[in-house]
Amino acid sequence: MGEILFSMVPETVEKVETEYRRIVTPIPVPESLPLIETLQQYEPLSMRGQPLVVWDRAEGVNVYDPFGNKWLDMSSGVLVANVGHGRIEVRNAMMDQLEKPLLHNYLFPSAVRADLVKKLAEVAPAGLNKVLLLTTGSEAIECALKLARTWGLKKGGKKKNILIAFENAFHGRTLGTQSVGGFPELKEWIVNPDPDIYHVPFPSDFRCEDRSFALFEKTLQTRGIDPDDVAGVISETYQGGSAGFFPETYARTLRTWCDDHGALLIFDEVQSSFGRTGKFFAFEHYGITPDIIACGKGISSCMPLSAVIAGPEIMDMYGPGSMTSTHTGNPVCCAAALATIRLLLDDGLLENAAVVGQRLGNELEKLKHDYPGIIGALHGRGMVYGIHIVKPGSMEPDGELTHRIVDRAVKRGLMLFAPVGTGGATIKICPPLMLDAAGVDDAVLAIREAFAYETNRGG
Ligand SMILES: Cc1ncc(COP(=O)(O)O)c(C=O)c1O
């Protein structure tokens, strides 16, 4: 993500004024450059790469800078603000904790942590009724991997240590999460990779021709893996880099395969849960239940909180004090998460994500139809889509054009993060779940304007 940088040179752009968007200055805003330069001076290079817009205030589906511009948000930050930015219900819940005050609780009992773990166990499938609260998505994945390997050790001894993950998977940027991550270029730094982690092709990337489960088994066979030595299989429920889902039959067969070989199925729901796809958890689309769910991002719609959810046989393998974290279940984060879940369920946001998301998907399909040979594929469901840009008539990613389209859309008042996925050629569309139909139409209008401008200019 973000190898091509957005230009620091302000461009005078056509003014934009719709119900959802307002652009009244050059972009980037000249007055914002000193602030951006301060960040560049004091933060590592790795923090660059996003559009050069100063986020000053964000409410509902909008992000505002301090210079009079307003964006319609298609990023949800980074798929975090599921119930919308800055919702008063979330702020009030956090304020109650701030005013008590109870700002920290570690493992000491607190009412708000009790309420949240109970709520999460209630919304999770039956049997997955133990919840460990952590802070980041990566931390939840690390914990899930530890649980899977501990399970393997317990059930099959040291040789039942193998973890199977998927090519093009993203699970975070720490040692364990990048070891199971499926982008080789992101993990060269590991140098001596874990010899018991293997990757198989993900079956719904549009470049993967064989989408049958047979490819999974064949890949293991080619690598000489005894299926009974597999401790766990981990996958994003849909891949974040592409917004590609498993074919349903593949997912169901994978579930059965894990059962047959005593391997734990871990779904990384860090990005895909809390309504993003129109269901509470994305695996509900497959009609199966994993053994371990890892959540993060949208769980609180704003605060750093994550969770691992599984049954007691898995979650109680570690004794008192031996699977914890300093900031586990921070009270302010818990309050935000409880308010988020209440909004998701009481405001009908899951239904809205399904219904309005369908309209979004339909409109993006029409866009794809209008740009044959440039949009290689459109993946997604509910309120998450990946538009895959290719070099004309090929499968080769066109990262440069993708970047220009994102830049142009931002200059038309649509908030997008930098392109993701293979070759940095996927435009991710992932608005807050409260977006309405008129908002979809306005967003698609801006995307169309960006496509028209950049494809004409590119000849
Ligand atoms: C699917 C998935 N898993 C894990 C992570 C890592 O989460 P975090 O950045 O909170 O550590 C991300 C973050 O983008 C993600 O999208």
Image: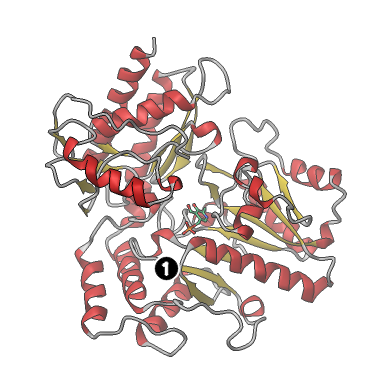
The kind of residue tagged 1 is Leu
Q: In this view, does 413 lie to the left or right of 119?
A: left
Expressed as whole percent of the image width and height from the top left, the position of residue 32 reads 20, 42
Residue 72 coordinates in the image, percent (x, y): 24, 41
Judge by depth and name the residue closer to the eye, 19 or 357: 19
Residue visible at 84% across and 46% down in the picture: 223
> Which is nearer the eye, 30 or 92?
30
Dot 1: element: loop
At which x and y percent is residue 50?
A: 37, 41
Residue 120 figure quarter: bottom left
Tell me if 211 is positioned left or right of 33 in this view.
right
Along the horizontal axis of the image, is 131 left or right of 146? left
- Evaluate whether residue 102 shows in this view: yes
Residue visible at 35% across and 45% down? Answer: 40
- Which residue was labeled with disc 1? 305
Position of residue 207 measured from the top left corner of the image (x, y, whole percent): 62, 30
Location of residue 2 by image quarter: top left
Disc 1 within 8 angstroms of ligand 1 (CB): no
Residue at 59% in and 45% down:
186
